[in-house]
Amino acid sequence: MLNRGKAAFHNDLLVRDPVTRHPLMIPGMSVPAGESLWLPLNVSLGSDGLCRECSNFSSAERVVYATAELLTVEFENGILAMEFAAPEPGEVILQLAREPVGPYLAAGKPTKFDWDEKTLRARLSIPASKAAGNRVRVGLAVEEPETSAFFNDARRLTIGQKNVVSTVYSSPEVASRSRLRVPEGFTAVPTSQVAKRNRLHDRGSRRRLAW
């Protein structure tokens, strides 16, 4: 997309999907005046595409389109990460072979994403970035990561009473290396519990810690 005008371009864009050969409407395209953006259309997520580490993806899995410039694609520890140049908010549509297992992440904050069970497509929002080059990374947990550590719930703590901060780890080894940093004058005591995973295909266990 090249905007040679003196005003910003913002409109829907009608293109042809290279895979289905059907018309495809890309909504909310934005290109600043005098700027150009290389926008992805039918970019493979397989190892033959932009991501050399994406050997777990089939040739049919792809970025259908995005309304921000796609810079890099990486896949590590079950997380599909994409880096965009996004001066304005956008979205990316992914064609996958299975439903993702985890939340969509942007700027380190977990947020919701749309999943269509019929078409096996995920729609992710791309937040605008004020960083150098308007770079922003978003990620999606496509597979259960080999090693992981999460907060079960992030709640505000109340001064004057005991508060429980619950965390979960993929293994006792990861849990043993975990530390909770607290402000000066506060203390935290860990208690451990092993919990069975709910997924039928996974016979492992997670180590839960409550601080």
Image (cartoon, helix red, strand yellow):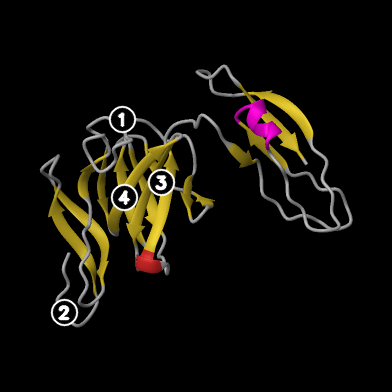
Q: Is residue 171 magenta?
A: yes
Q: Nearer the viewer, residue 85 or 64?
A: 85
How far is the residue under mark 1 from the one under mark 2? 42 Å
How far is the residue under mark 4 from the one under mark 2? 28 Å
Give residue 147's position: percent from left, percent from top. Answer: 55, 32
Q: Residue 143, labelled with which disc?
A: none
In the picture, measured across the screen, residue 202 lies left or right of residue 59, that is right
Give residue 165's position: percent from left, percent from top. Answer: 74, 44
Mark earlier in primary sequence (4, 2): 2
Give residue 92's position: percent from left, percent from top. Answer: 32, 51
In the picture, measured across the screen, residue 139 lies left or right of residue 172, that is left
Circle 1: element type: loop
Q: Quadrant of the C terminus?
A: top right
Mark earlier in primary sequence (3, 1): 1
* Amino acid beneath label 2: Gly
* Amino acid beneath label 1: Ser
How far is the residue under mark 4 from the one under mark 3? 22 Å
Mark earlier in primary sequence (1, 2): 2
In the rendered image, the residue lying farthest to the bottom is 6
- How crowded pointer 2 is (Cα within 10 Å; few <14, some 14-19, many 20+) is rated as few
The residue shown at (71%, 24%) is 194
**Residue 5 in sight here:** yes
Q: Residue 72, labelled with which disc?
A: 4
Circle 2: element type: loop
Q: Quadrant of residue 84?
A: bottom left
Mark earlier in primary sequence (4, 1): 1
In the figure, 64 relative to 8: above or below?
Answer: above
